[in-house]
Amino acid sequence: MTDQRTTVEGSCHCGSVRWSHEGLPDSTTACNCTVCRRYGALWAYGFRDEVIHISGRTEAYVRGEDIGFHFCPNCGCVVCWLALEPGKDGRQWGAVNLRLAHDPAIIADVPIRHFEGLDSFEDEPMDGRCVKDYWY
């Protein structure tokens, strides 16, 4: 469940691509798959045009058959990932990169979930760290 009183906003470095996440996320995910560990992203999930909103032109690196990692073609920041196909209900699942939030103080206490995306594809136990522990 998210806190609907807060909208988190962010953008790429040059500002060409912007995103918002309606509500403060309950958690954010740090994944150690071969792509996410290189990007260093912290993902906040939702359905596009419902919880997450993305504007501006992006290009995508398509990984496998299910997911596209979208980045700004001007400055190269990884802004989000989106499912390549909508679900059976017509909704598109994705996530925005919380590391690009405009106001880090809003998300400082959001807990980090670790996802073992390299081998087991399972959530790891929470260890008490939150976004502010990852800023440095």
Image (spheres, grey):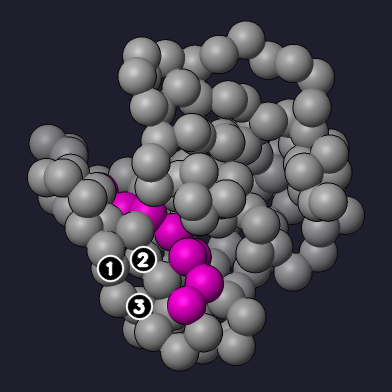
Pointers 2 and 1 in contact (C-beta within 8 Å): yes
Give the amino acid at mark 2: His
The chief SS type of the magenta part is strand
Q: Nearer the viewer, residue 133 or 11?
A: 133
Q: Are marks 2 and 3 in contact (CB under 8 Å)?
A: yes
In the rendered image, residue 53, in percent from the top left (x then y), is placed at 46, 64
Quick check: can you spot residue 86? Answer: no
**Residue shown at 66% from the left, 57% from the top:** 99
**Magenta-drawn segment:** 76-83
Q: Amino acid at mark 3?
A: Thr
Q: Are marks 3 and 1 in contact (CB under 8 Å)?
A: yes
* Residue at x 81%, y 64% (from the top left corner): 103
Residues 110 and 75: in front is: 75
Closer to the N terminus: mark 2 or mark 1?
1
Badge 2: how crowded within 10 Å, few (<14), some, or many (20+)? many
- Image mark for residue 70: 2
Dot 3: few (<14), some (14–19), or many (≥20) neighbours within 10 Å? some
Q: Which is nearer the N-term, disc 2 or disc 3?
A: 3
Residue 79 shown in magenta: yes
Q: Is residue 113 magenta?
A: no
Residue 96 location, x and y as percent?
50, 55
In this rendering, the count of numbered labels is: 3
Determine which residue is flagged by label 3.
Answer: 58
C-alpha gap between disc 2 and disc 1: 4 Å
Q: Is residue 25 left or right of residue 62?
A: right
Question: Disc number at residue 60?
Answer: 1
